[in-house]
Amino acid sequence: MSRSVTANLKTKYLVMTKKVIFIILALYTFSSWSYAGGGWPVPKGGFYFKLSEWWLISDRHYTDAGQIDPNITSGIFNTSIYTEYGLTNRLGLVVYFPFLSRAYVNNVVSGTTGDLLIAGDAINTIGDTDIGLKYSLTPQGSIKTAVTLTLGLPLGNSSGGSQQNLQTGDGEFNQMLSFDAGTSFSTKRVTFYTNVMMGVNNRTNDFSDEFRYGLEFGAGFLDRKIWIVGRLTGVESFKNGATAAQVNSTSIFANNSEYTSYGAELSYYLTSKIGFNVGYASAFRGELIFANPSYTVGVFLDFTK
């Protein structure tokens, strides 16, 4: 293979992997945002703590035209803590911190000779972190409403690896204002709840601002020891950022990601305060987002009751 062909292949590889990792980050950012507890802030002095592992491995993605195309197998693993703490009975602190984030891309191998064309790469750092304040608007009402201000801190690596094309963060500081409204009711055997969410996410560094939304249903069984939750969530881009922001001399950084995602989560309380959960989510339509599902497992402490 000639040097010019090899160089051209490496350039295309860098462009594609940069876009691929951004697509992962878009879904990863959404996964951290979807943890928050709806219209029910934690009461004063109460707290919820969760240690979890979230991962996504993908070999296909939605293009900017909404079609599904293959890509170099890439992935990200995040080991994180999520906590909510009640500062008052109406004001709560929410923190999501991925203290270990691993992003990688596989080797590129010739389909005819089996030769290694481009070596894979990986980085291990911390990830972008969310810190929020949630305020209850109707603490005594049958419909619980709350507003949340979330600050996205760019603590992750936005240009890592030997080619500077791997990321555990997007390098931009964002601010999201969201509104939740939820209600619950119980029968003799089952407790039900539902919550709707809408938010506007202001982003910097030429990223497009976003409208985010979510609908969640949950049911608790066996005296609330088992919870089954279903979610429908999404992001719509205002498309007011740069369509192609230059990151370095060899790669283009994608923008304007959109998707609608469905997901489910199962939580089980081993005791009244300790439990574990497992979850699944996948986008069924999108632009610049992976078409493969993500998974999560975690253990939690619940001192909110």
Image (spheres, grey):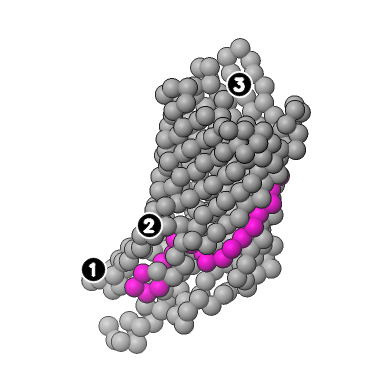
Give left or right: position of 212 versus 106.
right
Q: Please tell me which residue is depicted at 44% across the width and 47% down the height of the picture.
A: 80
Image coords of residue 105 (percent x, y): 36, 63
Residue located beneath label 2 in the image: 102
The residue that disc 3 covers is: 191
In the displayed structure, 188 sits above or below 225; it is above
Label 3: how many Cα within 10 Å (few below 14, some 14–19, many 20+): some
Q: Is any part of residue 180 visible from this angle?
A: no
**Earlier residue among tags 1 and 3:** 1
Report the front residue among 115 and 142: 142
> Residue 162's image quarter?
bottom left
Q: Which residues are magenta?
A: 161-180
Looking at numbered disc 3 in the image, what kind of residue is underneath it? Thr
Q: Residue 217 appears in which quarter of the rendering?
A: top right
Mark 2–mark 3 distance (CA, rounded to whole Å): 38 Å
Q: Is 164 above or below relative to 229?
A: below
Q: Give the residue pinned by disc 1.
A: 114
The image quadrant that residue 64 belongs to is bottom right
- The residue lying at 44 percent from left, 65 percent from top is 157
> Can you give x and y, in whole percent of width and height, for residue 262 in the image?
56, 43
Say which amino acid is labelled 2.
Arg
Q: Is residue 162 magenta?
A: yes
